[in-house]
Image (cartoon, grey):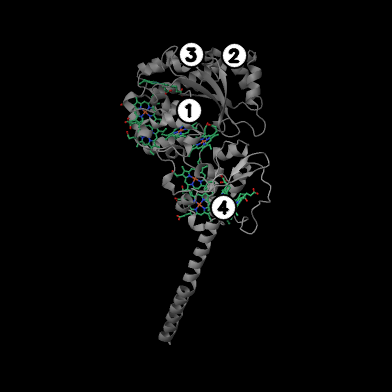
Amino acid sequence: MHGRRLATLVMVALFGLAGALIVARPDARAADGALAKLVEQCLGCHSVKGLEMALANGDKLTLQVDGEVFAKSVHSRFGCPVCHAGTSLENHPPVKKKIAGSREYSLEMNKICQTCHAPIFELYEGSIHASLFRDGNSYAPVCTDCHSPHAVMAKGAYDTSTGAPCSKCHDPIFKAYAGSVHGQATLGCANCHRAHDVTPATAGDRLKNTCLGCHSDTLASHQKWLPNAKRHFDAVACPACHSPEAKRKVDLRLYDRVAQQRVAEKQGVPQFESWARSADAKGAGLDAMALHSLLREFNREDNRTTLRGRLEVSTGVEAHQLAKSARAIQDCTTCHQQGADPFQSVTVSVVGPDGRPVRYGAQPEVLSSIISVDSVSGFYAIGGTRIKLLDWLLALAVLGGIGVPLGHLTVSWLVRKYAKRIGGKEDS
Ligand code: HEC
Ligand code: HEC
Ligand code: HEC
Ligand code: HEC
Ligand code: HEC
Ligand code: HEC
Ligand code: HEC
Ligand code: HEC
Ligand code: HEC
């Protein structure tokens, strides 16, 4: 009984397999043949040079498709119809649907990519590029801006040392990057920024953590010569020391001390710039009083907005000129000295609606004015910020061998006490 069932099963299986071989293989071949023939027919017209179509806004859509390149692309085995289901030999030319312009056409057609690559589309949806795109920025890349429609290659073809596809739009950064330690080591942009879920460069700690992901013993190696290296890593962007020729500056970020994150503009109600502009009546950049009244606007309802300083490079290009570490800034006086350069250029910022910072210029005096002690108390670089009382105390703490962490605590405590006194004076 058992044996007979097994025999029947085997027979059925063999029959099925044979059937599949007999029926399916020639069928598939026929389908391949038909598909190949269709591709040829499409290309019969679409390989013609100069074939164009006039669009509603006056754009000309170039209709030529390079058949040889397409044949080498990852999608060649699908033929044309998989992405152009609405377009057949029977129904065109002419094209009856109305096409507003070439960008509109590309955006509409890009929806096809997500039908097969949904997980990548989801990553992309969370990116700065997608949010720029949703805000109507017509330069923000969609799938085919980076991959092309008909010459889509395997993963390894992207983000190579040629900089493609990123260099197409970020060429000055690519040129600077190509000469950097990482460009020389032929890493690509996506090694730090990723390809699809690219986030704003200054958002959170993601970029810094990416550096530390590859350079894992870095904190320990800096601790050998840099006191409180962790605090330096928080307050000084890596390129500020590793891009030796860069111009450095200070960005004072509005910070919510309860939520412990940077203050972001409320969706749809941008207040920062208009408040900053009205505080800065002379238009010369916020001075200490103006900064004080800007903060008061933010603190009107709940007293939780403060400032967190960060020392960074002035431009995106300079962030990509990282040199061999032998050339990195090690001299403490680059920053810890009265009148030190990095503290002569100051901005105040919040996180804008798309995640990139919105900055407003401030005068360097905001870092040293007594009025600012309260608001910039979370940021004092000995010497650099020139709040003398703090310098003196910290120097004493460090020299006196109390140790930096303890020194830091002492200073924080004193600042708080001192700030309260200023606050008190103001209230009366
Ligand atoms: C007889 C020549 C010819 C053949 C064959 C042909 N096309 Fe076209 N195609 C055109 C012309 C001409 C236009 C522009 C029509 C216009 O200006 O109204 C066009 C426009 C298009 C467009 C752009 C507008 C749109 O509908 O999105 C696509 C895509 C397209 N063809 C794909 C195909 C595909 C896929 C095939 C094969 C199934 C194919 N074509 C076969 C001549 C041809
Ligand atoms: C993987 C999907 C995909 C396949 C396969 C595909 N196309 Fe396209 N095609 C697109 C997209 C997307 C666009 C919109 C153009 C853009 O975004 O730049 C497009 C645009 C076009 C256009 C308008 C001109 C242009 O380049 O913008 C023509 C003509 C066209 N395709 C013909 C073809 C033909 C012929 C084939 C087969 C040889 C084919 N396509 C295969 C996705 C595809
Ligand atoms: C800003 C440029 C850019 C955009 C926009 C973009 N890609 Fe990519 N894509 C890349 C790069 C670069 C790679 C190479 C992967 C890497 O280096 O990590 C890649 C890789 C891929 C891969 C290979 C598999 C993988 O997991 O990485 C697929 C599939 C892909 N992209 C599809 C898409 C689709 C679909 C879209 C639109 C939703 C899209 N890409 C938008 C740049 C881009
Ligand atoms: C019909 C489903 C389908 C559509 C539509 C489609 N793809 Fe693909 N794509 C695939 C498949 C399947 C592969 C894997 C091909 C292979 O390995 O032979 C692939 C491979 C890729 C790769 C290379 C992946 C790798 O790991 O090397 C990229 C990049 C890519 N597609 C981007 C796109 C873009 C951009 C679009 C829109 C213009 C698109 N795809 C539309 C099915 C699709
Ligand atoms: C070694 C890591 C790394 C690599 C690789 C890298 N970047 Fe960056 N990128 C950064 C850092 C760090 C910043 C600055 C962040 C900050 O200010 O805190 C940045 C900032 C940016 C910005 C914002 C610039 C601005 O004006 O504020 C863009 C755009 C950018 N990178 C694009 C690219 C492109 C394109 C490539 C490839 C050519 C690339 N990056 C390669 C680390 C990297
Ligand atoms: C089709 C054009 C285009 C391509 C291709 C492109 N980008 Fe962008 N990208 C933009 C635009 C436009 C912005 C917003 C303006 C700006 O910051 O330059 C932007 C912004 C960014 C930002 C955020 C900048 C900030 O201020 O924080 C980063 C990071 C970035 N791109 C990285 C990349 C990387 C990595 C690639 C390649 C994988 C890439 N871009 C490819 C157009 C492009
Ligand atoms: C205050 C300036 C300063 C800051 C901030 C700084 N570095 Fe450095 N870094 C240096 C100097 C100086 C050296 C060389 C030290 C030596 O040769 O002993 C160095 C060495 C390195 C090296 C090579 C040696 C090693 O430790 O592996 C790497 C990698 C590195 N830094 C990464 C980073 C990263 C990542 C960050 C940000 C999280 C950062 N650095 C922040 C100044 C700085
Ligand atoms: C994908 C891994 C990777 C990431 C991410 C990365 N690096 Fe590197 N980094 C390397 C490689 C590989 C080299 C070249 C080999 C070497 O000199 O160690 C290098 C070299 C360096 C050097 C020169 C080291 C020396 O001894 O001269 C510094 C400094 C450096 N990286 C800093 C950074 C900073 C800052 C970031 C983040 C903005 C970062 N790296 C992100 C892999 C990475
Ligand atoms: C590129 C600029 C830069 C360089 C170079 C630099 N620092 Fe700093 N340092 C800062 C900044 C900015 C702060 C403020 C950090 C804060 O308040 O968040 C700081 C803070 C400090 C503190 C206070 C730490 C604490 O616990 O609050 C000490 C001590 C210090 N630095 C010592 C040094 C010494 C010693 C060197 C040289 C070996 C050095 N720094 C190199 C920018 C720098």
Secondary structure category for the residue under label 4: helix
Q: Are marks 3 and 4 in contact (CB under 8 Å)?
A: no
In this rendering, position of residue 249 left or right of residue 396: right
Residue hosting label 3:
387
Q: Is residue 95 above or below residue 407?
A: below
Name the residue nearer the viewer: 35 or 360.
Answer: 35
Ligand 1 under 8 Å from disc 4 Cβ: yes
- The mark found on residue 316 in the picture is 1
Q: CA distance from mark 1 to mark 3?
A: 30 Å
Q: Mark 1 vs ligand 5: CB under 8 Å?
A: yes
* Badge 2 residue CB within 8 Å of ligand 5: no
Q: Earlier in the sequence, mark 2 or mark 4?
A: 4
Q: Which residue is mark 2?
A: 284
Q: Earlier in the sequence, mark 1 or mark 2?
A: 2
User: Where is residue 261 shown, x and y percent of the image?
Assistant: 54, 32
Report if the CB atoms under discs 1 and 2 are less than 8 Å apart.
no
Residue drawn at x 56%, y 22% is 348
Residue depth check, mark 2 versus mark 4: number of the one nearer the observer: 4
Residue carrying label 4: 45
Disc assigned to residue 270: none
Disc 1/disc 2 C-alpha distance (Å): 24 Å
Ligand 9 picture quarter: top left
Return the disc, 4 or 1, that comes first in the chain's sequence: 4
The numbered mark, 3 or 4, whose residue comes first in the sequence reads 4
Provide the secondary structure element on which disc 1 rests.
Answer: loop
